[in-house]
Image (cartoon, rainbow, N blue to C red):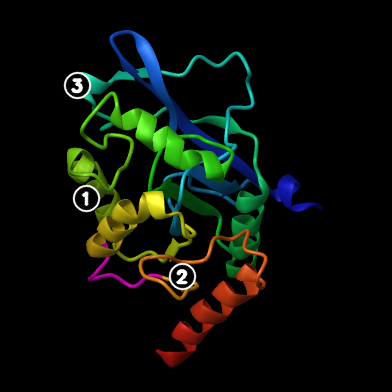
């Protein structure tokens, strides 16, 4: 059985609009579930924090994404989840889940903006700034601090994985994330520069093996 036969992905997609015009296509969360073993959908084993949603999109091409007005931005409450097409990054997270025997992982990002090419992300963020002086697209912004607090409270005793790569355009959100986690344990394969942690798709080494080694070392030291 292949990894994609065992795991499925579900995401909350939305669009940020201003004066009726879409200025950003976003995803606020992704749930990866082991469909063979999951018995309680509300029970989540781990939280992963990544850079941005990348290529993530609904399986249903006709799905109409809910719109959120930038002038009254709010994502509290229930978030409708739809089936999504998994990518290589999520495949690596699935392998971590399989090794740890987790059945449900939630993924959030430094920025919710969907941009499949990381080289174009700085431009997307600059374009966003022409519409808003705030940072509604990031759960690590002041505008969404209550939403973040609720999530961190939910995962108070759960493993947290940090793996957002080294995009300078996201450094302020990465720093805000680390500040939010300063009293929490988290796992990430460090780079030579703060506040960056290797992305699962790094070609320098096996990210999967490195992260598993970190997690197992921490457990054995207890």
Report the side of 12 relative to 21 (left or right).
right
Q: Quadrant of residue 113?
A: top left
Q: Quadrant of the C terminus?
A: bottom left
Q: Is residue 170 above or below residue 10?
A: below
Q: Position of residue 177 (x, y in %)?
A: 30, 57
For the point 24% across and 42% down, the residue is 147
The image's mark for residue 72 is 3
Answer whether residue 118 is visible to the viewer in this image: yes
Q: Which residues are magenta?
A: 181-186
Q: Which residue position holds label 1?
A: 149
Give the CA distance from mark 1 to mark 3. 19 Å
Q: Earlier in the sequence, mark 1 or mark 3?
A: 3
Instruction: Pick the residue in front: 218 or 176.
Output: 176
Give the CA distance from mark 2 to mark 1. 21 Å
Q: Earlier in the sequence, mark 2 or mark 1?
A: 1
Answer whether residue 28 is visible to the viewer in this image: no
Q: Position of residue 60 (x, y in %)?
A: 63, 21
For the point 33% across and 35% down, the residue is 137
Report the side of 19 relative to 164 (left or right).
left
Q: Is residue 184 part of the magenta span, yes or no?
A: yes
Q: Position of residue 36 (x, y in %)?
A: 67, 49
Within-10-Å neighbours for mark 2: few <14, some 14–19, many 20+: many
Instruction: Pick the residue in front: 161 or 9.
Output: 161
Q: Is residue 198 part of the magenta span, yes or no?
A: no
Mark 2, secondary structure of its residue: loop
Mark 1, secondary structure of its residue: helix
Q: Which residue position holds label 2?
A: 188
Q: Position of residue 131 (x, y in %)?
A: 28, 23
Mark toward the viewer: 1 or 3: 3
Q: Residue furthest right?
A: 1
Decide whether the magenta segment is chiefly helix, strand or loop. Answer: loop
For the point 50% across and 72% down, the residue is 189
């Amino acid at each position: 059985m292949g990894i994609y036969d065992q795991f499925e992905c579900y995401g909350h997609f939305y669009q940020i609009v201003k004066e009726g015009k879409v200025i950003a296509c976003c995803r606020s969360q992704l749930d990866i579930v082991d469909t063979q073993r999951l018995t309680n959908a509300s029970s989540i084993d781990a939280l992963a924090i990544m850079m941005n949603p990348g290529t993530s999109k609904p399986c249903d091409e006709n799905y109409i994404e809910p719109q959120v007005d930038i002038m009254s931005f709010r994502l509290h409450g229930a978030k409708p989840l739809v089936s999504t097409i998994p990518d290589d990054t999520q495949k690596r997270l699935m392998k971590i889940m399989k090794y740890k025997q987790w059945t449900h992982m939630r993924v959030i990002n430094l920025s919710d903006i969907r941009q499949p090419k990381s080289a174009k992300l700085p431009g997307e963020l600059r374009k966003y700034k022409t519409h808003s002086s705030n940072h509604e697209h990031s759960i690590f912004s002041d505008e969404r601090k209550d939403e973040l607090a609720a999530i961190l409270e939910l995962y108070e005793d759960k493993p947290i994985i940090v793996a957002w790569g080294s995009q300078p355009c996201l450094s302020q959100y990465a720093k805000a994330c680390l500040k939010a986690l300063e009293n929490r344990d988290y796992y990430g394969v460090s780079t030579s520069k703060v506040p960056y942690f290797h992305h699962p798709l790094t070609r320098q080494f096996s990210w999967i093996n490195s992260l598993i080694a970190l997690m197992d070392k921490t457990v054995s030291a207890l």
